[in-house]
Amino acid sequence: MSEQGLFISFEGIDGAGKSTHIAALAEAFRAAGRTLTLTREPGGTPLAEKLRVMVLNDAMDPLTEALIIFAARRDHLQSVITPALQRGEVVLCDRFTDATFAYQGAGRGFDTHVLHTLEQWVQAVPNSNASAAQTAKAEPLLQQPDLTVWFDLAPEEAAQRLAGARLPDKFESQPVAFFKRVADGYASRMQADPQRFARINAAQAREAVWLDVRQVFVSKGWL
């Protein structure tokens, strides 16, 4: 197995069950001898965790929300994700930029053109070999996951799973219509970059979902 770093993100509406399978996949990678970094967004660094509390609980307009999320992402990339990948580790991240487009973009109705601009600012990978003129003309190369595992689940079923599970944050307490828009946002992101996504039917029994998740990584030769 190559010791090249792997960046894997996990996406899905609240209640889709991704956390259980992130833990199982971490164990599978450890058994294969890989070193892991387990992290999440918003969060993953002391600064980003403070910003996470604000985003999940404080009332704010969508632009403020997006700016805080991307500020947390910038710190997360610089402090955790990029160094881990340079060390050849497997980075398993619970949510990344797709969640911003799904929740703030589709769910909250915020301008996706602004989100694309923030994505380019925050996730641009410096190209030391390019001239200044080339850099000015070219679309920036972005730090994106090597693979995004999308746990696709009907919002109605997700709501049933979440009912009474814990005190909801401001996103979890949104109505089903909000999560339908979020699910549509994830579908749009997958349509725009299908090679990066692996869609998992999260409505199956837990064991069946795990088999599907594991098979994705086996088929790529990563497990």
Image (cartoon, grey):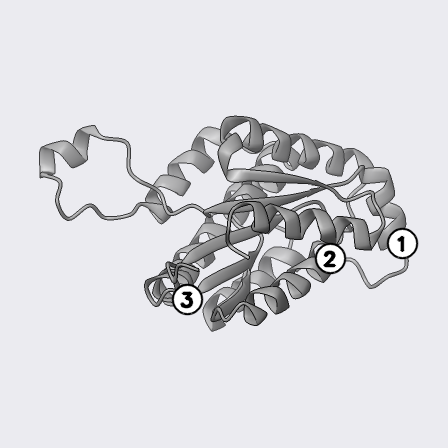
Query: Circle 3 sits on which residue?
Result: 80
180 above or below 215? above
- State the separation of the CA atoms marked 2 and 3: 25 Å
Q: Nearer the viewer, residue 112 or 3?
A: 3
Closer mark to the observer between disc 3 and disc 1: 3
Closer mark to the observer between disc 2 and disc 1: 1
| CB-based contact (under 8 Å), mark 2 and mark 3 | no
Closer mark to the observer between disc 2 and disc 3: 3
Q: Position of residue 64 (x, y in %)?
A: 51, 47
| CB-based contact (under 8 Å), mark 2 and mark 1 | no
- State the separation of the CA atoms marked 3 and 1: 33 Å
Asked which secondary structure carries label 3, the reply is: helix
Q: Quadrant of the N terminus?
A: bottom left
Q: Nearer the viewer, residue 63 or 122?
A: 122
Residue kind at label 3, given as amino acid type: Val
Q: Quadrant of residue 114?
A: top left
Q: Quadrant of the C terminus?
A: bottom right
97 above or below 81? above
Q: Which residue is found at the position 62% from the left and 69% from the top?
A: 27
Q: Quadrant of residue 82?
A: bottom left
Side of 49 relative to 186 (left or right): left
Q: Position of residue 201 (x, y in %)?
A: 75, 40
Query: Circle 1 sits on which residue?
Result: 163
Q: Which residue is found at the position 39% from the left and 66% from the top?
A: 84
Query: Circle 2 sits on which residue?
Result: 169
Side of 46 relative to 164 (left or right): left
Label 2: few (<14), some (14–19) or many (≥20) C-alpha neighbours in 10 Å: few
Q: Quadrant of residue 137?
A: top left
Label 1: few (<14), some (14–19) or many (≥20) C-alpha neighbours in 10 Å: few
Side of 178 relative to 43 (left or right): right
